[in-house]
């Protein structure tokens, strides 16, 4: 649904910006989100409390000693630092090479639309192959090559549209792999609580990386640079190189294929409940 809404909203935002300006569009969107979210809360069922909730144990965090966790976490961070660059800057790039603002927003819609198509397909690929590494290499190394070989040479609507559709379909699939990362890190233990904890950590770190990518992008863009007909229109060269390099570097996370989930650093911690251990220390 996120990809489909992302395909519809960019043209809508473009029309609102042209008619109401930045301030009116922002206020209107804030009101719409508040009203729709508040209305949706009426359909959310209350959570049923667990009569016997499991006590947290130090062993719940033993995945922190697994090399596989750190490899996949690093890949998630690196991918998150570059993923949104095309969505953020393709409209401005399109304007610089002579396209209209509406055409620029159309490119973002194509990214989100193809993302809605690519995510379930990459999920099916992971399930059919019994491994998340094939779609992982596709969503990282593949999208990096697309950025270098298509975006940098694109100076018209059709080539940029092809890049947008391919990038959204490949890079966007990385998001559906995080639950599989968590399952792969846990291994054969089938610890559902630990899988959810790992998934939450990966998602939170991805969010931090996404926010940080905006600040990094500012350092890569020279607003005073001259627009030319060369690679990346010259002005956007550093953004394109940054996106392509980061995506390809993120593909090194597939080295986790050679790391067993049972491999750990150091000794195995004592199986002691956090609550019980705290009480024991208090008695001492």
Image: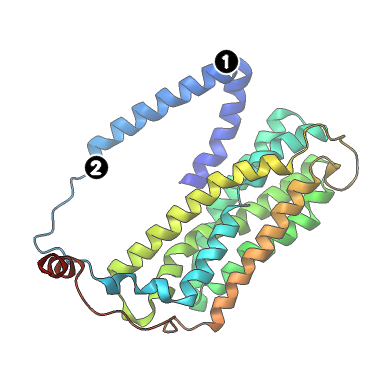
Residue at 83% in and 35% down: 97
Disc 2 crowd, CA 10 A, few/some/many (<14, 14-19, 20+) = few
Task: Identify which residue, 247 or 149, lies in the foreground.
Answer: 247
Disc 1 crowd, CA 10 A, few/some/many (<14, 14-19, 20+) = some
Residue at 39% in and 62% down: 199
Is residue 116 found left or right of 55 in the rendered image? right
29 lies above or below 229:
above
Residue 15 is situated, as x and y percent measured from the top left of the image, at 60, 23
Task: Identify which residue, 106 or 53, lies in the foreground.
Answer: 53
Residue 283 is situated, as x and y percent measured from the top left of the image, at 10, 67
Say what secondary structure mark 1 lies in: helix
Say what secondary structure mark 2 lies in: loop
Residue 21 is situated, as x and y percent measured from the top left of the image, at 59, 17
* Residue farthest to the right, as pictured: 229
Counting residues from the start of the chain, the first of labels 2 and 1 encountered is: 1
Residue 72 is situated, as x and y percent measured from the top left of the image, at 51, 68
Task: Identify which residue, 252 or 14, lies in the foreground.
Answer: 252
Is residue 188 found left or right of 117 in the rendered image? left
Q: Are marks 2 and 1 in contact (CB under 8 Å)?
A: no
Is residue 171 found left or right of 67 in the rendered image? right
Location of residue 53 by image quarter: bottom left
The residue at which mark 2 appears reads as 44
Location of residue 141 by image quarter: bottom right
State the scheme by which the image is colored: rainbow
Is residue 197 found left or right of 20 in the rendered image? left
Quadrant assignment for the C terminus: bottom left
């Amino acid at each position: 649904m996120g990809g489909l809404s992302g395909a519809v909203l960019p043209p809508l935002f473009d029309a609102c910006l042209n008619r109401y300006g930045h301030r009116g569009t922002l206020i209107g969107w804030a009101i719409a989100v508040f009203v729709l979210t508040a209305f949706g809360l009426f359909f959310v069922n209350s959570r049923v409390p667990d009569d016997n909730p499991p006590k947290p144990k130090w062993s719940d965090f033993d995945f922190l000693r697994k090399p596989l966790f750190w490899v996949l976490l690093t890949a998630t961070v690196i991918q998150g630092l570059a993923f949104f660059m095309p969505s953020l800057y393709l409209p401005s790039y399109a304007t610089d090479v002579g396209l209209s603002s509406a055409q620029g927003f159309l490119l973002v819609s194509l990214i989100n639309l193809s993302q809605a198509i690519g995510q379930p397909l990459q999920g099916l690929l992971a399930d059919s192959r019994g491994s998340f590494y094939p779609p992982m290499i596709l969503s990282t190394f593949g999208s990096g090559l697309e950025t270098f070989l298509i975006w940098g040479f694109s100076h018209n609507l059709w080539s940029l549209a092809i890049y947008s559709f391919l990038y959204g379909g490949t890079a966007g699939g990385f998001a559906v792999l995080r639950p599989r990362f968590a399952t792969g890190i846990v291994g054969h233990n089938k610890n559902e609580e630990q899988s959810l904890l790992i998934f939450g950590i990966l998602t939170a770190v991805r969010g931090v990386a996404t926010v940080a990518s905006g600040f990094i992008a500012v350092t890569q863009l020279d607003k005073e640079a001259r627009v030319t007909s060369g690679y990346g229109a010259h002005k956007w060269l550093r953004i394109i190189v940054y996106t392509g390099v980061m995506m390809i570097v993120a593909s090194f996370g597939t080295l986790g294929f050679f790391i067993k989930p049972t491999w750990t650093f150091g000794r195995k911690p004592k199986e002691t409940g956090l609550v019980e251990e705290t009480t024991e220390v208090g008695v001492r």
